[in-house]
C-alpha cells in the first residue's frame, strides 16, 4: 500500500457544451480533483499532450475534431495511448455504441441517462483502479 | 369484347368519317347539277323564273343541313360506340394471351426498366425505361455489362454471387444494389432477375427488372440525419438542467433553504419527465421509420423481471403494494433484451402507478416449449369499457388514469406493442374499471433473425 499518493488527481473534460463542462469541472474541484477543460477535439488533444491528465472525459459530437478522431490520435501517440478515456455522449444509438466498441472504448456514458454524481463516481472508480 | 371486335369498331369509325366527307363533297361540288336536275325547267332562262332561283337556293341549303346533320349524328353514334369499346379494361384475344405486338408494346413502353442478359451479364434488348435509367442509346446499353455497372463495397463478391445465380437460373428477387449509370450517377435499385426456362437455346434468356429506390433511400437518410440531430439538440439542454439541479441539490455547502430546495426538486422532476418524453418520442420515430432493428441475443427472462422489480422497488414500497411473482418453465429466450426490458418495464410501471396503496400486483410467467407468456395483473383503476379499444393507440390515456396520475406520455403501451410485434410476439389485455387490469404478453422462444 505504498503507492497512495498525495498528489492531486487530474481529469480532462472535452465537450463543446460549455455549460456542462463548467458544472462538471466545479463538481470535480469540489471532490478534490483538478479539472482541465477543452471545448473541441483539437483543443482537447493539445491540452492532453500538455497537461498529461490521468483520465479523459470525451464527448463524441464536437466541432473541429470529433471524439472518435481524438481517440484515434491518442492511440497513435505513444505517450498518451494508455490514458483511460470515458466516452460521454448524448447519443445512445447502436451506431455510436458500435463505433465506440470498435474504437477500443470500454466505458461509455450517455449523458441523459446519468446524473452528475454518477459521472464523478465513474471517474473516481477509474482513478482508484489506476493507483 | 375480344381484340377482333375492338379492331372492327375502330374500322367502323373510319368508315363513318369517310362517308361524311364524301357526302359533303357530293353536296357542295355538285350543287349546281342537282339543282338543274330537280328544279330547272328546260327552255327557260333563270332570269325569267326568279322564283325557281330562290326556291333552288332555299331547298339546297335545307338539303345540305339535313344531310350534314345526318352525317354528324351517324359519326357521333359511331364515336360513342368506339369510345365504349375502348373502355373495356383488359383486351385479350379469345385464347387468353396477348398478341406478340401487344407484348412488344408492353415491354417497350413499360415504365419499369426491362432488359435481357446472358450469363456473363452482357446486356441486350433494353426497353425505353432502361435507356432513360442508364442515360444512353440502345447501342451503348448493348455494349455494357450489368455486372460491371454494380457499385458495391464488395463488388467482387456480389458479382460472383450474381454470376452463380444467373448461371444456375436461381431467381433473384428485389435485391438492393447500387448501379452506375452512363451519366456517372450511382442509383439504388431493387434488382430482380428471372430466367426464361423454356428458352434454353437463347443466350439472352435472363430478364432483368429494376425498381429505382434512390429517392426513397435519400429521404430515409435525411430523416435519420434529422432524428440524430434532433436527438442531440433536444437532449443537451435537458442534460444541462439535470446536472445543474443535481449540483445545487447535492452540494451541502450551498446551504439551500427549504423553499429553494423544494422548487429545485420540482424543476428536477419536471426535467426528468421531459427527458423521458424526448427519449420515448425519439424511439417512436425510429420505430415508425423502421430503423429499429431487433438485436437478438440470449435473454434470461426471469433475471430481466427481477432486475426491473428491484429497480421499481422504491415506487411500490412507497405505496405499500404487494408484489407476487410466479414462474414456471425454462426462462431462456433468444430475443431483444432492450426491447423486452422497455415492454415489461411499461407494464410494471403502469401497474404500480394505477394500483392504489395496499393494492397487489401479480407477475405470472409461464414458459412453454415454443413460446412464453408473461402476465402482469393488478388491482388498479382499470380501463373504462368505452375506452378499451384505444388502449394501444398512440397518445391515448384513459380518463380515469389522467385523474390518478397527471403525468404520462400515452406512448408506453403503444411502444410496448410495437416492440412485442417487432419480436413476432403479441400482447392482449383484460380490464374492468375499479377492479383491475391483466396484460398478457406472449413471445416466441426464438425471435426471427436469431
Image: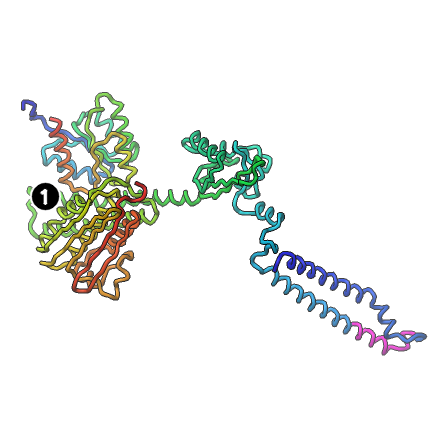
> In the picture, residue B62 is in which quadrant?
bottom right
Does any portion of residue B189 appear in the rendered image?
A: no
Q: Secondary structure at mark 1?
A: loop
Q: Nearer the viewer, residue A13 or B38?
A: B38
Q: Is residue B23 left or right of residue B139?
A: right
| Residue A65, image x, y percentages | 29, 32
Tell me what residue is drawn at x 79 percent, y 67 percent: B27
In the image, A70 versus B169, the foreground residue is: B169
Judging depth in this view, the residue of A121 and B104 nearest the camera is B104
Screen quadrant of the C terminus of chain B: top left
Binning the other alpha carbons within 10 Å of mark 1 as few (below 14), some (14 to 19) or many (20 upward) gives: few
Q: Residue B313 in the image: x percent, y percent? A: 11, 49
| Colouring of the image | rainbow
Magenta segment boundaries in residue numbering:
B45-60
Q: Position of residue B335 (x, y in %)?
A: 26, 43
| B178, above or below B394, in the image | above
- Residue lying farthest top? A78
Say which quarter of the image contains residue B448: top left
The residue under the point 18% across, 45% down is B304
Amino acid at each position: 500500500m505504498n503507492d497512495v499518493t498525495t498528489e492531486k488527481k487530474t481529469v480532462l473534460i472535452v465537450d463543446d457544451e460549455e455549460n456542462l463542462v463548467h458544472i462538471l469541472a466545479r463538481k470535480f474541484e469540489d471532490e478534490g480533483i483538478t479539472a482541465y477543460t477543452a471545448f473541441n477535439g483539437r483543443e482537447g488533444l493539445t491540452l492532453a499532450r500538455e497537461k498529461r491528465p490521468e483520465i479523459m472525459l470525451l464527448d463524441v459530437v464536437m466541432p473541429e475534431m470529433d471524439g472518435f478522431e481524438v481517440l484515434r490520435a491518442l492511440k497513435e501517440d505513444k505517450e498518451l495511448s494508455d490514458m483511460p478515456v470515458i466516452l460521454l455522449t448524448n447519443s445512445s444509438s447502436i451506431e455510436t455504441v458500435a463505433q465506440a466498441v470498435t474504437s477500443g472504448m470500454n466505458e461509455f456514458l450517455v449523458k441523459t441517462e446519468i446524473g452528475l454524481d454518477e459521472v464523478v463516481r465513474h471517474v473516481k472508480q477509474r482513478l482508484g483502479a489506476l493507483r | 369484347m375480344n381484340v377482333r371486335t375492338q379492331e372492327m369498331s375502330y374500322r367502323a369509325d373510319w368508315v363513318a368519317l369517310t362517308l361524311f366527307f364524301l357526302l359533303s363533297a357530293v353536296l357542295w361540288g355538285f350543287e349546281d347539277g342537282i339543282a338543274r336536275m330537280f328544279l330547272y325547267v328546260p327552255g327557260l332562262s333563270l332570269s325569267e323564273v326568279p322564283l325557281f332561283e330562290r326556291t333552288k337556293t332555299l331547298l339546297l341549303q335545307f338539303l345540305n343541313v339535313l344531310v350534314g346533320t345526318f352525317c354528324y349524328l351517324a359519326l357521333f353514334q359511331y364515336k360513342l360506340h368506339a369510345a365504349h369499346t375502348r373502355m373495356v379494361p383488359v383486351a385479350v384475344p379469345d385464347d387468353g394471351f396477348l398478341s406478340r405486338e401487344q407484348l412488344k408494346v408492353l415491354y417497350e413502353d413499360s415504365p419499369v426498366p426491362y432488359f435481357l442478359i446472358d450469363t456473363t451479364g452482357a446486356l441486350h434488348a433494353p426497353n425505353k425505361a432502361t435507356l432513360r435509367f442508364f442515360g444512353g442509346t440502345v447501342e451503348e446499353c448493348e455494349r455494357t455489362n450489368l455486372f460491371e455497372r454494380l457499385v458495391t463495397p464488395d463488388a467482387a463478391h456480389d458479382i460472383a454471387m450474381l454470376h452463380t445465380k444467373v448461371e444456375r437460373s436461381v431467381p433473384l428477387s428485389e435485391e438492393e444494389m447500387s448501379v452506375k449509370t452512363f451519366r456517372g450517377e450511382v442509383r439504388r435499385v431493387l434488382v430482380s432477375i428471372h430466367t426464361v426456362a423454356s428458352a434454353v437455346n437463347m443466350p439472352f434468356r435472363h430478364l432483368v427488372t429494376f425498381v429505382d429506390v434512390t429517392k426513397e433511400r435519400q429521404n430515409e437518410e435525411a430523416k435519420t440525419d434529422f432524428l440524430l440531430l434532433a436527438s442531440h439538440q433536444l437532449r443537451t439542454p435537458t442534460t444541462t438542467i439535470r446536472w445543474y439541479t443535481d449540483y445545487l441539490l447535492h452540494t451541502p455547502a450551498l446551504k439551500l433553504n427549504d423553499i429553494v430546495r423544494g422548487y429545485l426538486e420540482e424543476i428536477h422532476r419536471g426535467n426528468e419527465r421531459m427527458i423521458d418524453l424526448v427519449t420515448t418520442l425519439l424511439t417512436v420515430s425510429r420505430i415508425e421509420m423502421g430503423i429499429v432493428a431487433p438485436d437478438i441475443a440470449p435473454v434470461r427472462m426471469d433475471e430481466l423481471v427481477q432486475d426491473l422489480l428491484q429497480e421499481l422497488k422504491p415506487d411500490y414500497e412507497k405505496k405499500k403494494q404487494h408484489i407476487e411473482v410466479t414462474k414456471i418453465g425454462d426462462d431462456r429466450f433468444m430475443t431483444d433484451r432492450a426491447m423486452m426490458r422497455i415492454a415489461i418495464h411499461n407494464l410494471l410501471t403502469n401497474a404500480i402507478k394505477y394500483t392504489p396503496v395496499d393494492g397487489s400486483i401479480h407477475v405470472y410467467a409461464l414458459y412453454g416449449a415454443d413460446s412464453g407468456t408473461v402476465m402482469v395483473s393488478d388491482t388498479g383503476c382499470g380501463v373504462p369499457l368505452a375506452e378499451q379499444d384505444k388502449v394501444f393507440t398512440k397518445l391515448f390515456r384513459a380518463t380515469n388514469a389522467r385523474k390518478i396520475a397527471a403525468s404520462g406520455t400515452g406512448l408506453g403501451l403503444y411502444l410496448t406493442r410495437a416492440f412485442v410485434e417487432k419480436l413476432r410476439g403479441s400482447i392482449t389485455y383484460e380490464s374492468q374499471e375499479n377492479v383491475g387490469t391483466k396484460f398478457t404478453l406472449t413471445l416466441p422462444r426464438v425471435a426471427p433473425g436469431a
